[in-house]
Image: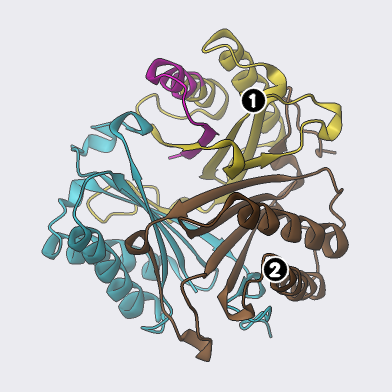
Chain colours: A brown, B yellow, C cyan
Amino acid sequence: MPLTRISLRAGKPADYREALTVGIQRSLVDTFNVPHDDMFMLITEHTADNMIYDRQYQNIRRGDDFVVIQLTVSNTRTVEQKKALYRRIVDELGKSPGVRPEDVFINLVEVDKENWSFGNGVAQYAG
Amino acid sequence: MPLTRISLRAGKPADYREALTVGIQRSLVDTFNVPHDDMFMLITEHTADNMIYDRQYQNIRRGDDFVVIQLTVSNTRTVEQKKALYRRIVDELGKSPGVRPEDVFINLVEVDKENWSFGNGVAQYAG
Amino acid sequence: MPLTRISLRAGKPADYREALTVGIQRSLVDTFNVPHDDMFMLITEHTADNMIYDRQYQNIRRGDDFVVIQLTVSNTRTVEQKKALYRRIVDELGKSPGVRPEDVFINLVEVDKENWSFGNGVAQYAG
């Protein structure tokens, strides 16, 4: 159910980008109870001048490997689950593909359960 | 008012991509009461390794023509209207450009009516 | 905290695109009380056939320089602040890089304060 948009600087090899998706999915499964096969992610690669970010906001030193992860999810998680997701994503991406914690930006957009159709024109999660 | 983001595999001809927008707009007009000229859509084409999705989640067999449609809309529709929109989009895109029902993923993001400006710096829908 | 997605026709020079980000950020600082260094923006350039919009909805004459600005923000602003933001963005972008008011489309997506992590896996704005 999450629809994940990953934005990063162009030029990383395919296995680096794949590792991002694997680490994020593992984090969603373990902290948000997402089924392991409920995986839908879009990656957009940007030139440097199309990815603008402050390199020290909140005293966090961001570098060229900065990645923006925006996840649209159903509005059923607690604040504690959200905090666990952030920690877990940073941990997973640190292990593979090796992203610094400072370079991981995460944003959640929440929607109602009936706001999804996974195919066939059906609202699979509607009551 | 809807802002529609369409994501698909790169390489489809222009008339295929145009047919997607025409079918989605027709569906919005008929099920969400959107004015026919209230049409704002962005298409992003992805390489295969930048569009990651499970090919059988919910027992739906997705193929290479999988398309993700994320629509930001005002929060004024009923669950029945949402279900009607999903059915209608799948029906329209099946007729033209000929997308299989299994390959249509839809997500709605809802916002308040004052969250739109269609130009001139005015919140046209605010009370 | 705002995550801003800017979509425009491909081909504008870098200083034009940079001016868009500067004008939007200035507007956020002055109307939404965003810290000046809280700046995170993604620009996507589209071919003409991947950017579909009505050229006269709401009697607003849109041209080729049409730009879509979708901002994800925390849900703490009043309607008056939103109206002020729209006016200010149009004013700023009119001055530089010189966008016509008719060509500025703005949409706000609102989220809870705990829906952000600016790095290090921490929900910096959570209570």
Residue bearing mark 1: B64
Q: What residue appears at the point 69 percent right and 85 percent down from the top-left corner?
A: C127
Magenta region: which residues?
B1-23
Tell me which residue sits at (80%, 74%) in the image. A84
The residue where tag 2 is placed is A93
Question: Residue A18: where, in percent of width, then height?
Answer: 67, 52
Q: Give the residue at x 73% y 60%.
A: A24
The residue positioned 60% from the left and 22% from the top of the image is B89
Kind of residue indicated by mark 2: Leu
- Residue C95 drawn above or below residue B117: below
Which residue occupies the foreground of this view, C60 or B95?
Answer: B95
CA separation, marks 1 and 2?
Answer: 27 Å
Image location of residue C17, percent across then percent down: 25, 59
* C101 on left or right of B69: left
Give the side of residue A58 with respect to residue A78, left or right.
left
Which amino acid type corresponds to the residue marked 1 in the rendered image?
Asp
User: Callout 2: helix, strand or loop?
Assistant: helix
SS category of the residue bearing label 1: loop
**Is residue B16 part of the magenta span, yes or no?**
yes
Label 2 CA crowd tier, 10 Å (few <14, some 14–19, many 20+):
many
* Residue C36 position by quadrant: bottom left
Residue under mark 1: which chain is it in? B
- Quarter of the figure with the C terminus of chain A: top right
**x and y percent of residue B7 in the render?**
53, 36
Q: Is residue C100 in view from this perspective?
A: yes
Q: Quadrant of residue A105?
A: bottom right
